[in-house]
Image: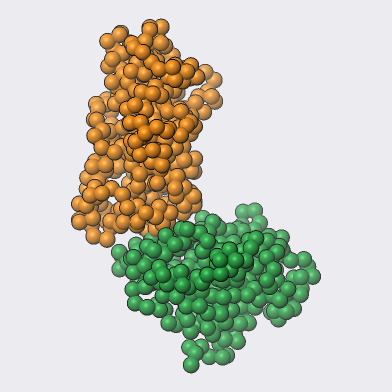
């Protein structure tokens, strides 16, 4: 028995498609972005923001809020769209994405958008930052949780494993890492680059509790989040196997950098069955 | 200097509960007292310098004031990009302590040589860069670091560093007068200060009386002092145990180049080389012409007097370069 009703799943999937359409629109408008990286993690963000994270649009700096770190900063348009849909940022800002002076730059910047927990864009930073933040919160007796969304390519970075070691040593049970495993890096396939080894096994060998799920399934994500923390005293990781969610962009590394043409934008919106968030 | 660091940090942490100390598995027994007194605020991250930096950034984002500690090359060059992004991009008040900068670990070889720490840290926007020359100077600077809003790097010595007298207090960003004099200004940084003072004492016997300043802060550069000293002396001799690229000489020369007129600026210090051969720190300073006698000889030459002793061919060629 799942933790989420079918009606809610359908509702959240519609939101996910709207977020996806918004990302494609933003990439088209700005002729910019890492579209595939933004699209593959949409359901993860929707499940987090609509089902799990304790964050309040009216009090985003609440000390007891859950901390969310967009470690895969290059895929940030989906986070921007989620923040707009949740009312945490003004939806008008989406139209300014990646333009000069925008609070929504190509890679997320905490100086421009203070609601972020951290700036990102260089991989392999936020897991370590989150471990330090959780350690500090524990010293203060603050029970807030932290979620770090990473890319599969990011797990090539040695610093991820330095942080993984620390998180287990310090028993950071309030830490959840989610790896968006879309299997596509900038110029190669993750499985090939990592030698066809299992990421969840690597995390387990570092003392983490790990689960592998379909990262595009709202229901699997909801169930998995419901079971957090997976094991006592251990940090948790979800290896979320994902697809891009737009048929003509699947399994095509070109879409790491490419932005859509007008025709491709219309085709994507048509396939998704949802219009982008209106910014006007 | 490491004992001065441990004692001062312990007393600061007594008053300020936001201080946390992270080590990259170094400083054996140095920080036991800190760890005993402040349970949970001493963290051995392991030989994981990138993690040490990122965790410190996370703690600072939550309102803490982390001090991170390792041997200079492992505190700076190893996690450089993590310092630049996790700490400096966020403008966080994290203090990085590089122990044994320069060639304190001379005999450990190029893996442990830390001549590039000043250059690496200086190039990071918003970073305050310091290299005190004595335990007392370090004790004076540490409480002031607590008032900085952004990140800081502080290179410290290892052990047995001599104390010296100075006319005034050590203030971050201000050159410190160690000895009055005229015509030549010897400007030291880091642990070269007592050597510069020794050289000045020897020079006094020959009737040469240089003024000696210690620039314990390399960034921000004390340009007020540089403008003032430019009016008073004919030559500024920079004495540093750091790379000739990106250290104090480099910073002073860059500043002076934009001034309409300035004194002659020369440098003595190690070259831009991997130092091989397992020599001691003292041998290294002698070989490359930045020990007491070498400084004496440079100043004597500047005043038209002959050398006090023999100097190596290498030293001659180096002095020729400056």
- In percent of width and height, residue A156 lies at 52, 61
Would residue A46 be found to the left or right of residue B5 on screen?
right
Above or below, A198 against B310 in this view is below
- In percent of width and height, residue B32 lies at 21, 52
Q: Which quadrant: the C terminus of chain A?
A: bottom right
Which is nearer the eye, B166 or B188? Answer: B188
Which is nearer the eye, A279 or B189? Answer: B189
Would residue A257 be found to the left or right of residue B280 on screen?
right
Above or below, B155 against B88 in this view is above
- In percent of width and height, residue B251 lies at 47, 30
| Outermost bottom residue | A1
Q: How is the image coloured?
A: by chain
Above or below, A42 against B114 in this view is below
Q: At 60% from the left edge and 58% from the top edge, which residue is drawn?
A: A105
Q: At 53% from the left edge and 91% from the top edge, which residue is drawn?
A: A5
User: Would you say residue A19 is visible in this rendering?
Assistant: no
Q: At 34% from the left edge and 16% from the top edge, which residue is drawn?
A: B296
| Outermost front residue | B277
Would residue B61 be found to the left or right of residue B193 on screen?
right
Question: What color was chain A assigned in the picture?
Answer: green
Which is nearer the eye, B43 or A63? Answer: B43
- In percent of width and height, residue A130 lies at 42, 63
Query: Which image quadrant for residue B45?
Result: bottom left
Above or below, B230 against A126 in this view is above
Q: At 50% from the left edge and 59% from the top edge, which residue is drawn?
A: A157
Kindly indicate which chain is depicted in orange in the rendered structure.
B
């Amino acid at each position: 028995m799942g933790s989420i009703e079918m009606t809610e799943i359908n509702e959240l999937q519609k939101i996910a498609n709207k977020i996806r359409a918004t990302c494609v629109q933003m990439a088209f408008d700005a002729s910019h972005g890492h579209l595939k990286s933004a699209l593959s993690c949409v359901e993860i963000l929707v499940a987090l923001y609509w089902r799990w994270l304790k964050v309040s649009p009216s009090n985003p700096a609440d000390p007891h809020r859950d901390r969310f770190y967009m470690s895969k900063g290059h895929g940030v348009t989906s986070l921007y769209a989620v923040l707009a849909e949740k009312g945490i940022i003004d939806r008008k800002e989406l139209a300014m994405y990646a333009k000069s002076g925008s609070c929504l730059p190509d890679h997320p910047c905490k100086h421009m958008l203070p609601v972020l927990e951290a700036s990102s864009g260089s991989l392999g930073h936020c897991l370590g930052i989150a471990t330090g933040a959780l350690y500090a919160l524990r010293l203060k007796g603050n029970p807030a949780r932290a979620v770090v969304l990473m890319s599969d390519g990011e797990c090539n970075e040695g610093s991820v494993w330095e942080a993984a070691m620390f998180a287990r040593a310090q028993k950071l049970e309030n830490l959840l890492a989610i790896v968006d495993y879309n299997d596509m890096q900038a110029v190669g396939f993750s499985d090939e680059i990592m030698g066809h080894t299992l990421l969840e096994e690597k995390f387990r060998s570092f003392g983490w509790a790990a689960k592998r799920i379909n990262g595009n399934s709202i229901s699997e994500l909801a169930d998995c989040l419901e079971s957090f923390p997976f094991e006592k005293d251990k940090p948790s990781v979800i290896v979320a196997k994902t697809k891009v969610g737009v048929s003509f962009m699947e399994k095509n590394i070109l879409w790491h950098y490419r932005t859509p043409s007008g025709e491709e934008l219309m085709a994507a919106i048509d396939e998704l069955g949802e219009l982008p968030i209106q910014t006007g | 200097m490491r004992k001065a660091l441990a004692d001062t940090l312990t007393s600061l942490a007594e008053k300020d509960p936001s201080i946390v100390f992270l080590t990259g598995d170094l400083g054996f027994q140095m920080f036991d007292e800190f760890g005993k007194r402040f349970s949970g605020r001493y963290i051995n991250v392991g030989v994981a310098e990138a993690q040490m930096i990122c965790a410190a950034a996370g703690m600072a984002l939550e309102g803490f004031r982390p001090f991170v500690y390792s041997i200079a090359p492992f505190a700076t060059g190893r996690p450089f990009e993590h310092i630049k992004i996790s700490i400096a991009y966020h403008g966080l008040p994290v203090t990085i302590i590089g122990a044994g900068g320069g060639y304190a670990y001379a005999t450990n070889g190029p893996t442990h040589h830390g001549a590039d720490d000043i250059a690496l840290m200086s190039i990071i926007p918003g970073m305050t860069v310091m290299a005190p020359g004595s335990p007392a100077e370090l004790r004076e600077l540490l409480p002031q670091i607590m008032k900085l809003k952004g990140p800081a790097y502080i290179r410290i010595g290892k052990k047995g560093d001599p104390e010296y007298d100075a006319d005034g207090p050590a203030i971050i960003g201000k050159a410190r007068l160690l000895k009055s004099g005229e015509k030549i200004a010897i400007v030291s940084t880091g642990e070269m200060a007592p050597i510069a003072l020794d050289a000045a004492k020897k020079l006094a016997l020959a009737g040469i009386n240089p003024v000696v300043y210690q620039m314990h802060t390399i960034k921000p550069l004390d340009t007020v002092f540089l403008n003032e000293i430019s009016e008073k002396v004919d030559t500024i001799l920079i004495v540093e145990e750091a790379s000739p690229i990106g250290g104090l000489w480099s910073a002073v020369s860059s500043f002076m180049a934009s001034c309409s007129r300035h004194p002659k600026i020369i440098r003595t210090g190690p070259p831009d080389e991997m130092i091989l051969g397992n020599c001691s720190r003292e041998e290294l300073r002698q070989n490359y012409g930045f020990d007491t006698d070498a400084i004496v000889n440079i100043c004597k030459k500047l005043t038209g007097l002959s050398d006090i002793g023999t100097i190596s061919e290498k030293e001659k060629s180096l002095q020729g370069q400056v």
